[in-house]
Image: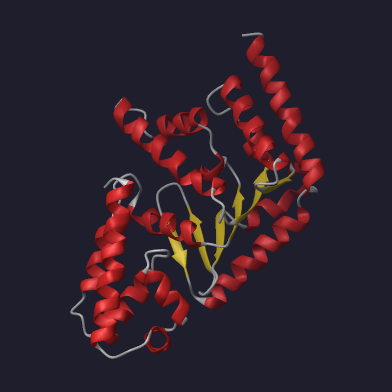
Amino acid sequence: MANGSRQAAWEFFGQELKRRREDAGLTQVELGIRVFVSGGYIGQFEQAIRKPQLDVAQRIDEVLQSDGIFERMWRSLIDDHRYADYFAEVVELERLATRICEFAPTVVPGLLQTAAYARAVTIAANPFVTDEYVDEKVTARRERAQILGDATRPEYWVTLHENVLRAPVGGPAAMAGQLEHIAGLMRARTVWVTVLPYATGAYASMAGDLRIMEFEDAPLVAYTETSFSGTLIDDPAVVKRAQRAYDLLRVAALSPEASLALIVSAAEDYRRCASTT
């Protein structure tokens, strides 16, 4: 579904929500209380500014006795074949988040990837796919990254393990471009990136791929991922443990200044290597 069509569909979701809410004689605040979000959040759903999580859509169906229509619309709109089933909801949550904190132990996070790096990662994981498949995945990843250019972009805190800098994904030229891209975002104060160096030892074993997302009017959620699956976590106790793990990783990392120097140095090494091949 094209972005314009998807937005129009979310606008219909909002219009239908408003119509059924008013038919039920409920204000935004009253509906919000019943589905455990703020009235302002309901208003943003109705204006298609924000998208609800699945459990909120399900609770709206229960309160408004709408026979599952909002859950069905949600599932239809979130179902994006460009992403794995377990990741599609995460993409929507990224657009709603006010802060994203991420730990990447092996590869550059998708929101920071250049096209060349994303292409190399996609082909490495899917060596027998068509060029069209690769192009679609790369385009989807670059579209996700557009949230970092929005005026309402989330704060994006990233801790990279030094592995990410040292693995020559896509070859020296691609790695040089990738690290230069990250350094540029850091200098522009678009993202906050630190590096967890090899010298920290056991800290890296404390978490795999980990992301924690904060929202204006909703509880934090955590997301963990392996090579073949991902898990979205909203249990407050588990999210609290994930937050603590991330905090420990962050304090063990290099300072932003030292991290930038290490990233720039690695980029220069790759650039020199690329120029000699």
Instruction: Name the residue located 28 percent from the left edge and 56 percent from the top edge.
Output: 8
Residue located at (65% from left, 32% from top): 179
**Direction from residue 125 to residue 69 in the image, left or right:** left
How far across and how far down the image is residue 239, in percent?
56, 71
Q: Nearer the viewer, residue 212 or 199?
A: 212
Residue depicted at 55% across the width and 73% down the height: 238
Tell me how many marks there are. Answer: 0
Q: Is residue 132 above or below residue 162?
A: above
Q: Nearer the viewer, residue 33 or 158?
A: 33
Q: Quadrant of residue 265?
A: top right
For the rendered model, the colour scheme is secondary structure
Residue 135, by quadrant, is top left
Residue 37 in view, yes or no = no
197 vs 47, nearest the viewer = 47
The spot of residue 234 in percent (x, y) is 48, 72
- Give 249 or 275, whichever is nearer the viewer: 275
Direction from residue 71 to residue 236 in the image, left or right: right
Task: Estimate the x, y position of residue 169 in percent, counting from the top left.
Answer: 55, 29
Q: Residue furthest left?
A: 67
Q: Answer whether residue 99 is visible to the viewer in this image.
A: yes
Residue 112: % across, % down? 56, 41
**Looking at the rendering, which quadrant does residue 55 occupy?**
bottom left
- Position of residue 141 in the picture relative to residue 205 (left or right): left
